[in-house]
């Protein structure tokens, strides 16, 4: 299985690391660190050197309670970073929900769009279909400002599965090839701890959808609920959750701590090889 991201063809075996660079003042774990474009580009290179296969740049926090930023503000934060990353030896993904931003960043060299809104916005499917870029279709319930107020499901795994299957079908119908599509159940996006754990336990169910499964559990508040640790002290819990995700079939891990995740994955891969 490969993920086709523009000119990059990424094998998904062993699982890949997507390193997060947030060009925001308010992201929940690294806000403010990379607001300067040069610092963001430097951080992207650092994450690549540590073992990331994809860099995911976000300019709007989607943490619970986050307020949206304007489209121009989002572009003003991202485009100078993309300019500095031209010629990078790995695909750059942009974490955005806005079709206008998608079109602009794809024209500026982005090879993947990571959309927490699963290309549901008007024009988003067309923006992707007109490119060769990959896309991550993520599930969420509600909008970030209020999504954690009272998340509710009858059967969270089934409902997320149905949603992602429908979004894959919509993307395929728009002309986006199967090898360009990744899917993500959206840990923490309108889900309480029980919902998140059910999705982690049921992750293998999503593998039958024929798209690479991406998991983003790094430093998330579900880990605080389990360990009691503040955001700066969730590395061990993040690594444990990452390994549970790959054991469940995730092939892309979206993480903040790339070097440590690479080592954890190396142990997992060595373990797997011995069992084949
Ligand atoms: N999580 C966050 C943002 N984007 N995209 C995908 N596909 N999956 C995720 O789980 C996911 C995501 C939230 O994390 P982060 O970017 O670190 O924080 P913030 O939204 O506060 O910028």
Image (cartoon, rainbow, N blue to C red):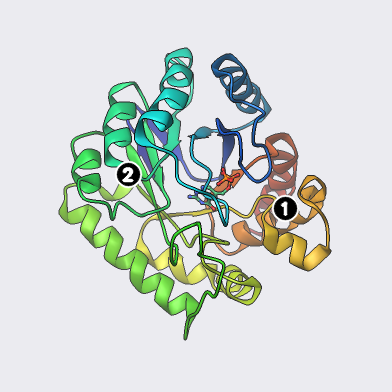
Residue 176 visible within the image = no
Judge the density around disc 1: few (<14), some (14-19), many (≥20) Cα neighbours within 10 Å.
many
| Residue in the picture at 18% in, 43% down | 126
Q: In this view, does 230 lie above or below 156?
A: above
- Please tell me in which quadrant of the rendered image residue 110 appears: top left
- Please tell me in which quadrant of the rendered image residue 241 appears: bottom right
Residue 249 visible within the image = yes
| Residue in the picture at 65% in, 72% down | 193
| Residue in the picture at 16% in, 50% down | 174
Ligand 1 is within 8 Å of the C-beta of the residue at disc 2: no
State the SS at label 1.
helix
Residue 170 x, y percent position in the rendering: 22, 58
Along the horizontal axis of the image, is 157 left or right of 167?
right
Judge the density around disc 2: few (<14), some (14-19), many (≥20) Cα neighbours within 10 Å.
many
- Which mark lies nearer to you, 1 or 2? 1
Along the horizontal axis of the image, is 159 left or right of 222?
left
Q: Which mark is residue 180?
A: 2
Q: Mark 1 points at which residue?
A: 238
Q: Earlier in the sequence, mark 1 or mark 2?
A: 2
Q: Residue furthest bottom?
A: 154
Residue 271 x, y percent position in the rendering: 72, 54
Residue 77 x, y percent position in the rendering: 47, 25
Residue 74 x, y percent position in the rendering: 42, 32
């Amino acid at each position: 299985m490969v993920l086709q991201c523009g000119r990059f063809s990424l094998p998904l075996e062993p699982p890949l690391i997507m390193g997060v660079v947030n060009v925001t003042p308010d992201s929940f774990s690294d806000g403010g660190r990379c607001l300067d474009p040069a610092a963001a580009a430097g951080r992207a290179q650092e994450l690549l050197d540590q073992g990331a296969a994809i860099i995911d740049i976000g300019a709007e926090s989607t943490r619970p309670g986050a307020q949206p930023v304007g489209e121009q503000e989002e572009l003003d934060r991202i485009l100078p970073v993309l300019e500095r990353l031209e010629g990078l030896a790995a695909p750059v993904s942009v974490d955005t929900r806005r079709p206008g931003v998608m079109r602009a960043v794809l024209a500026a060299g982005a090879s993947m769009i990571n959309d927490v809104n699963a290309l549901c916005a008007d024009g988003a499917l067309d923006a992707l279909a007109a490119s060769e870029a990959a896309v991550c279709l993520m599930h969420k319930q509600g909008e970030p400002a209020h999504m954690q107020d009272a998340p509710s499901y009858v059967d969270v795994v089934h409902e997320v599965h149905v949603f992602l299957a429908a979004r894959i079908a919509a993307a395929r119908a728009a002309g986006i090839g199967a090898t360009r599509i990744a899917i993500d159940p959206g840990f923490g996006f309108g889900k309480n701890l029980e919902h998140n754990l059910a999705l982690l336990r049921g992750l293998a169910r999503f593998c039958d959808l024929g798209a690479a499964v991406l998991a983003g559990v790094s430093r998330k508040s579900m880990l605080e609920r389990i360990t009691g640790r503040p955001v700066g002290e969730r590395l061990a819990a993040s690594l444990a959750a990452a390994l549970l995700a790959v054991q469940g079939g995730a092939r892309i891990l979206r993480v903040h701590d790339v070097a440590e995740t690479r080592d954890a994955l190396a142990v997992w891969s060595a373990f797997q090889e011995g069992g084949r």
